Image (cartoon, rainbow, N blue to C red):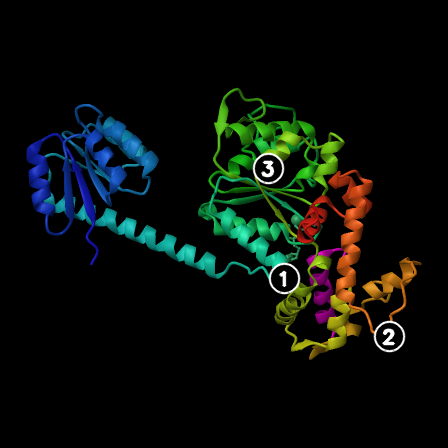
Amino acid sequence: MITYNIYIVDDEDTILDSVSLALHGEYHVETYESAEQAIDSMEKSPPDLILLDIGLPGMNGIEALGRIKSSHYDIPIIMITAYEDINTVISAMKQGAYDYVVKPIHMDSLRVTIENALETVRLRKEVQHLQEKYLKENLPCYIGESHAVQDVMDLVETVAKSPDTPVLISGETGTGKEWIAGAVHYRSPNFKGPLIPVNCAAVPKDLIESELFGYQKGAFSGARASGKKGFIEEAANGTLFLDEVGDLSLEAQAKLLRFLEEGEFYRLGDTSKVRVNTRVIAATNKDLDSMMEKGLFRRDLYFRLAVVVVHIPSLNERREDISPLAKHFLVEFSKKFDKNFTGITSDAMDALVTFNWIGNVRELKNLIERGVLIGKGPKLTVQDLRIKEGYTLQGIKKAEHDICFPPIPPTGVDLASLQGSLEFFYIQEALRMAKGNESKAARLLNMNHHTFRYRKKRLQIK
Ligand SMILES: Nc1ncnc2c1ncn2[C@@H]1O[C@H](COP(=O)(O)OP(=O)(O)OP(=O)(O)O)[C@@H](O)[C@H]1O
Ligand SMILES: [Mg+2]
């Protein structure tokens, strides 16, 4: 059986003695003659419930109530008052007191009030526990067997634990950036707060500031008469996900930077600041390095957002993930369309593994969805996928390049190491031509900076 811990805070010895005697045995009771002493000891071992006198010397009960609620919101506090002063009682209830009792205290009614309060706490904890369990068990899983995906998930686990750290997610379109933003949010302590996604590219440039920061009534023509909370305020105690952050105007970038630095901002047309605690996750499929070079993205904002960078390599760079992803989507869409697909033919899987994935996982998902929808089953075939010749890597090679490759010698070649050497050579060559400037070198190889950096690191090129 749980023994609840109750603090009694009152300057009258008779109250402390009589109430603690009455509750002794059922509860673990600690008595304090002042709010200051009680608050001090709460730091070491917070109680489950507090009986708090209003008319205390030094810090009075109402002041103490505010202090305790700001740091231990969940602890129910029952106020003790010498006479039923309606204004004081209302003020206490407004500040979050659970209930109040009037002196002289009737122990039977106090007992019922305490039992009810503790039952509320117990139920709240149970709901919270079930919510956490449900969310953990129902988190969509991020599929992938490659080292790259394992590295991404390890980083997600680590960064999720520090709920104030900004995160920048980079990767080509369809690699799963939004997915990763959700994973960071739901694995972090602020998962009980909201996850507010904002697609910066979808909001018109002249509206983005009012959408992000909100506005005061009458801030501009067309503004709502009542004013409006912005996305940042909506995301209080949760996560603000700024998708396509590269599309923010320079003005909005400046305001966002100020918010990240100070934790405060002004609503449009307002003169008092709003303080909001939220984690900012930004994502982009643009090359922010080259945008910074062109003066289109603020460097100082980049460093604020990129405290932790999670880079998701393109699907073409982690082909080991194609088969598990394809199987996962096959099951998902088979269920959705009530089909009986049991697998993928080896020809179809070969085609998938050698396909040039420009739209990454999203494209793979769409292809499987269409295949399952039009296919008859029980196996997904190349015909179901409708992959056109010319789109697979072999096809592209045929169509695009006139490069002469040396013939295969009788002893054969080690293709995997040849590919590695080719990559090694071109990355070094591009760096040489770009005089060590990584983003220029990346552009020479038609890849984004993060992909370039990832490959360079993997090949240990200095
Ligand atoms: N590893 C994965 N496991 C399962 N599903 C995935 C994975 N990666 C991506 N997806 C799925 O692929 C689709 C595209 O992912 P998402 O929308 O997160 O991409 P994105 O990087 O945000 O793209 P964009 O830059 O175009 O906004 C989603 O439906 C997502 O569910
Ligand atoms: Mg996205």
Q: Position of residue 102 (x, y in %)?
A: 15, 35
> What residue is disc 2 on?
410
How far is mark 1 from mark 2, CA to CA?
A: 33 Å
Where residue 407 appears, x then y in whole percent? 90, 68
Quadrant location, ligand no. 1: bottom right
Q: Quadrant of residue 35?
A: top left
- In this view, the residue in front, 245 or 396, is 396
Q: Are marks 3 and 1 in contact (CB under 8 Å)?
A: no
The location of residue 251, given as percent across then percent down, is 66, 27
Neighbourhood count class around disc 2 (C-alpha, 10 Å): few under 14, some 14–19, many 20 upward: few
Residue at mark 2: C-beta within 8 A of ligand 1:
no
Residue at 56%, 55% (x, y): give it.
153
Q: What amino acid does circle 3 point to?
A: Leu
Q: Is residue 282 left or right of residue 61?
A: right
261 to 44, vertically: above or below? above
Quadrant of image for the N terminus: bottom left
Residue matched to label 3: 305
Chain part drawn in magenta:
356-375
